[in-house]
Image (cartoon, coloured by chain):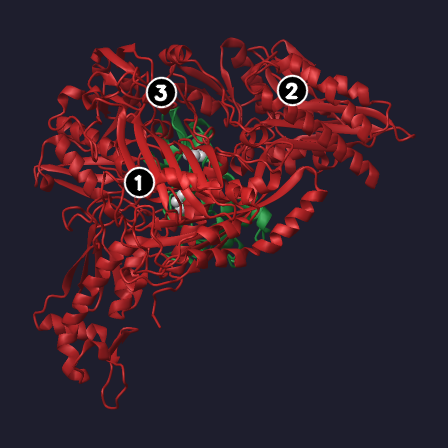
Chain colours: A green, B red
Amino acid sequence: MINLKFKVNGKEVAIKVEDSKRLLDILRDELGLTGTKEGCGIGECGACTVIMNGDAVCSCLILAGQLQNAEIETIENLERDNILSNLQEAFLEYGAIQCGFCTPGMLMSAKALLDKNPHPTEEEIKTALEGNLCRCTGYIPIIDAVKNVLDKY
Amino acid sequence: MYNIIGKKIKRIDGYEKVTGKAIYGDDIYLKGMLYAACRYTDIPAGKISKIDISEAKNIKGVEAIALYKDIPGEKRLGPIRKDQYAIIKDEVFYSGDVIAVVAAQTKDITYAACEAIKVEYKSYTSVNNPEDSIKPETRLIHPEFKSNVVVHYPLVKGNIKQGFEESDHIIERVYKTGFVEHAYIEPESVTVIPDPTTKGYKVYGSIQNPYTTRKTVALFMGLNLNRINVFGSTLGGSFGGKDDVINMMACRAALLAKITDKPVKLTNTREDSIKESYKRHPYIMKYKAGFNKNGKLKAMKIDILADSGAYSSQSFFVTWRSVVQATGPYEIENIQTDIKAVYTNNCYTAAFRGFGSPQIIFAQESLMDEIAEICGISPLEIRQINGYGQGSITASGQKLSGHKVSLLQVIKEAVKKSNYKNQIKKFQELNKINKRYKLGIGLSCSFRGCSLGAEGTDATSAIVSVQADGSVYVLAGLNENGQGLRTSFCQIASEVLGVDIDKVVFLEPQTATITDGGPTVASRSTLMGGKATLQAAEEVKKVIFKVIKKDLKVENIEDTIWAKGFIKKNKPAENIKPIKFEDAAEKAYGAGLNLSAYGWYSSPEVSWEESTGQGNAYFTYVYGCQVAEIEVDTFTGKINILNITAAHDVGKVINRLGAEGQIFGGVAQGIGYGVLEDFNIQNGEVKSNNFDEYLIPTIKDINHIEPVLIENPDKFGPFGAKSLGEPTLELTSAAINNALAFATKKRSYQIPLTLEQVFLGKNLKKPSRQSEDIHLSKNKKLSPKISNIKITTPASLDESIDILNKKKCKILAGGTDLIIRLRMKSEQQELLNIYNLPQLKGITENNSGISIGSLVTFSEIIKNKIIVTNFPVLVKACSLIGSPQIRNRATIGGNIVNAAPCADAVPPLILYNAKLILKSQKGTREIKIQDFIIKSYQTKIKPDEILVSIKVPKPEKKYYYSYFQLGRRNALNITRMSISAIVSLDKNNLVEECRLVDGSLFSHSQRLTVIEDLITGKELNNIIISEIEKPLFELINREIGNRWSSEYKMPVFINLVKSVLKDIKDKIGKS
Ligand code: FES
Ligand code: FES
């Protein structure tokens, strides 16, 4: 068991978990943040993507023991005061969602990109999202959505 | 003319999906619920002699273990023929069979209990080739059905013998397609809750067809239908896939819920999902075609063998669609088609987007191009000569009438939009110049019967209910699978009633509230369910009209307009004010009228004669044409899809955003089917058991897709709408295959068009022997899951070394490799988490070179200015590793110590003469990286040592460089091969120094000194580059010549080495 202290979506979290728990399990099972999804468990689908200390990571590949003092941001943090971020709006507007299972991960990868690079090229968008598989949309509406996010997202 | 039909409408279930609030199967949590898991078989075929659950039962926290004998109701299940088991008795039919199911208090306990269930078997020789399956001497897989043939559909039209006699040419070709995994990103999950009110069960989960689930669970539990209430959760993709498999899982969870009287959740891991779930049928298709000199088809004989796998499931229906459509959209007088589906011990096969069409279209449309070539006409002409027109007679003798037969129209639109004819000329010209990369363009077209056709009962239901305040509910007997059904149904209600779509709410369906709407399959939801919604909305409209007709002074509903929330006369008259919809609703409500209506749409008549395969198979058809433009790397066989133009007649577009989305998504799956998705199952053992082995397209594999929506409203569908979901996928692989033939002048008869398939004309797979598999399976962990680990996080490097000196630990750095491997280990693992040690981070520069801390991530490397300037090959290689998520975590040290042959950072480090600094309590030592790695996954690191940093000397002179990495797709790759090269010149422009390092070729990366020596001192020109071929061949042959993959790897690697040298030569020339 490990006593963990870290931040999720700006809030301090202190919990005790088993060593074998992954960040993904902690978010979903311990903290009830089920917006982050598991698609493969091996870093190959990106459905579990969250932002850790400013970078997109696969939460299925991070063990509890590596979370001490980390800052985590999840999909649940994107909507503020019932207002969707421009990025979320763009996903709706451009039809970047079908089944929606890849969407939280996609949005987090896109956000990690836009946080550092608000005006990415198409190539940069593709590179930022290359670790996120989507089986429904054929990706084109997703690229369009990210390309067209307004400056403030 | 419509308010909302045909426009781009945001999906109404979008909000919950972009916020993470949508509840998918595995997001369900109930207090006190138990977690279930399946104990799968260890072998693909055999007889169980003993099941021992004694150890598992005693594990603390295990609440129930259910076996075959515990099944209360029907033990044999299956949608058509009862040959399938949710829990098997003693016969094992395939590797996804379940012997026992366990429910326990935590997931970890459940998995541990599954591992603890010991099973003994007598193995059978598993039957894996459908051609063997039908041989008389082959063991019967389900003896009670007396044959391994599940179903045989014949179709006979005209006189085949005469047709061939009258033909100028006859050709025969065999086409093959493989298993395809649905690869919905959400693995299946189901939760069953005992329901004391009904004395039955509530079932939640990722369920495509709630009515089928209800029926199956009721049968299995021995209960009436009204005791089972199924609630679909938000579905994370299905594509036909979350049907039979989820029904089986629901049965198991229900049984455990019964035994424990607690809610039970059963969620598949990806590995379980791929192992257990059904696939698209592999087909072996023999086509014989007779035709005239001018290209007119005279006769066609088709024999198809479909692999049904362990169970019959939907094979009856899937192969039926194939028999109807196997000759393609072409008029042929004489036809004989026979299709058989057969049992094997492979994964079973059932519904998957396309449903028996992608296979035959691949064959049929590839064949048409070849016929055109023989006749000396264009692919376009052959289709114009033979293609269906108004009134054409199909293979099954159906006259195509009552709808617009738009085949030639869709072809014309696709050709126009893709600039097909000009592109052909352009590509031909460019191909003359470029020796390596060849461009190709190809087209394919199809007709497709809408909805279920004569395959089964075809009717569906919907309820539209207007509330007193004018708001509206829509409920449908079909399911939202992600395709956007909720949005289009709400649009339809909104259009009919003239209310804003925001006023319409789609209610979560549950099987208890609305009649069985049949399955959400066969692209039938818009056509059938949309029509039922339309009917229901029109009923309600009539009721409301009754209370307002006086006010509006009209007699007939046709004289009114319902739009934007108002009802008005269509001929505006003074002093008659439009009525607000909500006022009208309130008035009707006040008058005691029923504002709910039930729509039931039953399809028009269809017919089928089993023995001859003749009849009016479907009541209407859609037509489509796709053009593929591709680039082929002839050095490696890699195909890059440049553009797909997809023209589809949809009848009428309901939601443009949704319709285009269907095309993008369907085409992307078609690209996967055609090029990437190579499901590997050998001797019944699934080898591609996760997304690292089963490759679906990434964002970088899709370039451009151009949707062309053509509208010829159909009299049957709502507003004239027909189908779109499946046609989008079925055409792509054939178009790509035809484009490949254009590019390389070689035809392929098999998909996927993998590197090997394109380069060698055959698909290579790592061979495996059944005996080996069985041996391996004894030791393997059943469900990959991290369970038994202990992590220590030292505060400093010294402390780490101290700990390592005392006990054996695995070092955990970024974890991107280790964590994956930990999933396969059951015994306890001690980890030393060094990831945050500052001493191992950072990149520093001094006079002689740089020092890279072993914990520097790939993302840091590719951004670092010093590295970018001095070590471009390292940057290139690291930028192609995995994905940003991986590069943000994975460390250079981890990559080196792990020593996988495909480790991408290693070859450039060898290239740049890197040295490793290792530290232990005994001191620090330095070792050259090429001396450090012994072979695959083996290094000279001692158990008490830590890799501290990597020293790379700065190049003292100017090096020209080149790097090439080959992967199966354009991102998220495991490197198939790479080559790193740098060259420096002396003052006479002769090669002073040359360094070449392989990646992923030999058991560990190494310098190609033989080639380096050959080049050194010479001028780098084409002659010397071609001279390396022989010694390089000898070198590779000696090292890896007898590996299964060498037939591909040897010539390709030689091509790659030559190409990077040529690249350097060109760079020298330019400078
Ligand atoms: S679940 Fe983490 S990458 Fe797929
Ligand atoms: S929307 Fe379904 S996986 Fe992306």
At 45% from the left and 59% from the top, the residue drawn is B409
Q: Chain of mark 1?
A: B
Q: Which residue is mark 1?
A: B156
Q: Tell me: residue B835, above or below residue A118.
A: above
CB-based contact (under 8 Å), mark 2 and mark 3: no
Whether residue B333 can be seen here? yes
**Circle number at residue B184:** none
Label 3 crowding class (10 Å Cα cut-off): few <14, some 14-19, many 20+? some
Q: Quadrant of residue B526?
A: bottom left
Q: Quadrant of the C terminus of chain B?
A: top right
* Left or right: where B1012 falls relative to B940: right
At 19% from the left and 43% from the top, the residue drawn is B211
At 7% from the left and 70% from the top, the residue drawn is B592
**Circle number at residue B1005:** 2
Q: Quadrant of the N terminus of chain B?
A: bottom left
* Left or right: where B224 falls relative to A78: left
CB-based contact (under 8 Å), mark 3 and mark 1: no
Element carrying mark 1: strand
Q: Quadrant of residue B102?
A: top left
Disc 3 to disc 1, C-alpha distance? 26 Å
Element carrying mark 2: loop
Q: Which residue is mark 3?
A: B132
